[in-house]
Structure formats: structure tokens, C-alpha cells
């Protein structure tokens, strides 16, 4: 039996940083994200009686370092008595570099694993399974603009806007394709124990969520820009004040931020966000995308540019 799934990564505008339950991987705060249609992960699962263990191949290369997390995800969805699987993953963007590859990878894996078991599609269940392995992956189960809420001992996801209601573009300036120095999981765990700003971060998330939700409802770009940049810089302040400090930015990241601020000064509707990595994402309106690409491409240290409109929920197919 074989199943394939394709899923898009998402970037949070109102971020998740820290867990309220590490065993269940439950986030400490609610979050809000954009699903990125231009970026994708394709995941194929082949179940076989011939295999003696799981095998993982990412972009054509055997991958040992992510195998245990992938096997853990398959155990969660399929049960521990499952057959071993060959998992073949393909991604059209750099992985483990702050471009949310775990969100597209684990959402695709959960969808493919359920498909290979012939399980009926269940977005909330799939989101909680994906979230159990990677907090951000839960949000990739829906397209457009997505909210993740903490509900008692689980999470719920909700689409706030579909891909056509409020089309937004994301211009991604890649400033370093290398693997990040510390994983998000490890870094956020350190932050929760050592940053003096961590408690303030948790306490102030709810007003940011309310503001962003309202901005999406009203399609108010300036409102979404202001709260998103504020929330992003607040998360990075928590990272910077972690012991030892977690600094994902490089010089080009900062230069891109200044360039985006200059564009804002000249009246351009654009704003920045950065995750656990040095890449900068500029959110803008589709009609202005070309100008933003041109400006960011001129900056020293920008290695390449990717662009994305909003993307849809994952898709899957099976084969005997
Ligand atoms: C987010 N990030 O909301 C935030 C912003 C990175 C910075 O969710 O520990 O790799 O596996 O649940 O899913 C990092 O994502 O973290 C993350 P884990 P994950 O997108």
C-alpha cells in the first residue's frame, strides 16, 4: 500500500514560542498564520513487509537525523504494531533553516499516514496529530489565513480567511540556506526557563491575537502589519534574552528589515516577519510584489528570493 500527500508550510504572523505541555507538545500561546502556496513538501509512504526498519529519504538523500521523529509520527497515527515504511520526502525550499519545513513535512506525513490506513479525512484530528509532533504543523492542515487556539488539553484550528477573500503575497529573502544552529524545540524550551521576558510574552499574546483577528476580518493591512511586526520582534526579544542567547538573524536579515521600513515610509503596504532562522518574509499585496522583490534582491547577503501567494489545505492520494 502506498499513499502520497502534498502540504504547504505556513508562517506565523502571531507566533508560537514555548510549550504549555512538553509531553503532548501543546503550545503555550495561540497563533495565527499564512499558508504558503508557493512552497511545498510532497511525502510518499510505502508500507512493506520486506523492511526491517523505517527508512527516510529527503530530497533524494538518506536522512538519519529526522528518522526517529518521523517514526514517532507514524506510530502515533498508525499504532505501534504497524508495518515498517519507506518515507520519501521532497521539498522545494531549504529545510531546517527557518522556513517552517517541519510544518509542511509533518502535516504531509500525518495526511499520508492516515491515507495509507484508509482513514476518513478529519481536519481537527489530523491537526492534533501533526501538532503533537510539531506545533506549527497543525496550522498547515488548513489553507489561507489560519488561527490555532488552545482548548483545554488540545488545540483547535480555524480558517479565518480563504485564499481568495484577501489575497496576500509573501516575498521570502533567503539569507542563509544552512541548517540553523539550534532547533526551535530546544530554543523555546531554553527561553521558557531563562528569558526574563517569557512571562510577559505569554501574557501579551491574547491582545495581539485579537488585533490580528480583527485586522483579517476588516482586511485592514496597516493593522495587520503593525501587530505582526510587533509580535515578531517581541518573540525575537524573548529569544535574544534567553540564556544562552538565541540569535537567528544575520546582517542581511537586519538590512532587509531596514529596507522594508524604508518602503513603508514611502507609503508601500508591506511588513516583515522572521521565524527561527535568518530568512526574512515580506508580506505585501500581490500587485506590489514585483517592487518588493526588486528592493530585497539588491541587498547584500540576500542569496535568493522566493515568492508565494496563500495556499490551500493538504491533498492526498493512495495506490495499492
Ligand atoms: C511559529 N515557530 O509560530 C513559530 C515562530 C518558529 C518561530 O513554530 O517544537 O518546529 O516542533 O513544536 O513546529 C517552530 O516550529 O516547533 C515554530 P516544535 P516547530 O511558527
Image (cartoon, rainbow, N blue to C red):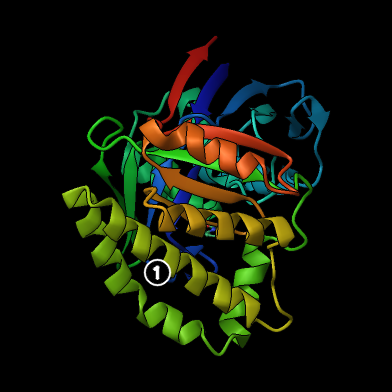
Callout count: 1
| Quarter in which the N terminus is drawn | top right
Q: Does the numbered disc 1 mark a residue whose Cβ is under 8 Å from ligand 1?
A: no
Going by the picture, which residue comes out furthest to the left? Answer: 218
- Residue 19: % across, % down: 50, 70
Q: Nearer the viewer, residue 42 or 245?
A: 245
The quarter of the picture where residue 145 lies is top left
Relative to 41, residue 49 above or below: above
Q: Is residue 72 left or right of residue 86?
A: left
Q: Is residue 133 left or right of residue 313?
A: right
Question: Which residue ends up furthest to the front in the rendered image?
Answer: 266
- Residue 155 in percent (x, y) is at 35, 58
Quarter where residue 314 is shown: top left
Q: Is residue 210 left or right of residue 142?
A: left
Among all residues in the image, which is located at the extreme bottom?
Answer: 196
| Viewer can see residue 79 | no
Q: Is residue 300 left or right of residue 143?
A: right
| Residue 122: image location, x then y, percent | 32, 36
- Provide the residue designation for mark 1: 29
SS under mark 1: loop
**Label 1 crowd bin: few (<14), some (14–19), many (20+), radius 10 Å:** many
Residue drawn where x is 36% and y is 82% of the image:
203
Depth order, front residue of 8/221: 221
Q: Is residue 176 above or below residue 55?
A: below
Q: Position of residue 127 (x, y in %)?
A: 40, 46
In the rendered image, the vertical position of residue 298 relative to residue 108, given as above or below: below
Which image quarter is the C terminus in?
top right
Question: Is residue 183 among the parts visible in the rendering?
Answer: yes
- The foreground one among 185 and 167 is 167
Write down which quadrant ligand 1 falls in: bottom right
Amino acid at each position: 500500500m502506498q499513499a502520497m500527500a502534498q502540504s504547504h508550510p505556513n508562517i506565523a504572523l502571531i507566533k508560537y514560542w514555548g510549550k504549555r505541555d512538553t509531553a503532548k507538545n501543546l503550545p503555550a500561546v495561540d497563533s495565527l498564520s499564512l499558508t504558503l502556496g508557493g512552497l511545498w513538501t510532497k511525502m510518499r509512504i510505502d508500507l512493506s513487509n520486506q523492511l526491517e526498519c523505517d527508512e527516510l529519504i529527503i530530497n533524494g538523500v538518506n536522512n538519519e537525523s529526522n528518522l526517529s521523529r518521523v517514526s514517532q509520527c507514524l506510530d502515533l497515527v498508525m499504532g505501534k504494531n504497524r508495518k515498517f515504511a519507506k518515507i520519501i520526502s521532497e521539498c522545494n525550499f531549504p529545510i531546517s533553516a527557518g522556513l517552517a519545513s517541519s510544518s509542511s513535512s509533518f502535516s504531509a506525513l500525518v495526511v499520508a499516514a492516515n491515507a495509507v490506513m484508509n482513514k476518513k479525512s478529519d481536519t481537527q484530528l489530523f491537526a492534533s496529530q501533526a501538532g503533537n509532533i510539531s506545533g506549527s504543523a497543525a496550522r498547515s492542515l488548513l489553507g489561507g489565513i489560519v488561527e490555532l487556539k488552545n482548548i483545554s488539553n488540545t488545540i483547535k484550528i480555524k480558517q479565518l480567511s480563504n485564499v481568495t477573500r484577501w489575497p496576500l503575497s509573501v516575498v521570502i529573502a533567503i539569507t542563509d540556506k544552512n541548517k540553523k544552529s539550534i532547533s526551535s524545540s530546544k530554543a523555546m524550551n531554553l527561553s521558557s526557563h531563562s528569558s526574563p521576558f517569557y512571562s510577559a510574552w505569554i501574557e501579551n499574546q491574547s491582545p495581539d491575537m485579537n488585533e490580528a483577528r480583527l485586522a483579517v476580518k476588516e482586511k485592514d493591512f496597516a493593522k495587520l502589519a503593525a501587530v505582526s511586526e510587533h509580535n515578531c520582534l517581541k518573540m525575537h526579544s524573548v529569544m535574544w534574552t534567553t540564556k544562552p542567547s538565541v540569535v537567528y538573524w544575520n546582517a542581511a536579515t537586519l538590512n532587509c528589515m531596514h529596507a522594508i521600513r524604508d518602503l513603508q515610509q514611502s507609503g508601500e503596504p508591506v511588513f516583515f516577519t522572521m521565524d527561527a532562522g535568518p530568512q526574512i518574509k515580506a508580506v505585501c499585496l500581490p500587485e506590489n510584489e514585483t517592487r518588493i522583490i526588486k528592493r530585497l534582491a539588491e541587498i547584500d547577503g540576500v542569496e535568493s528570493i522566493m515568492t508565494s501567494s496563500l495556499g490551500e489545505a493538504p491533498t492526498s492520494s493512495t495506490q495499492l
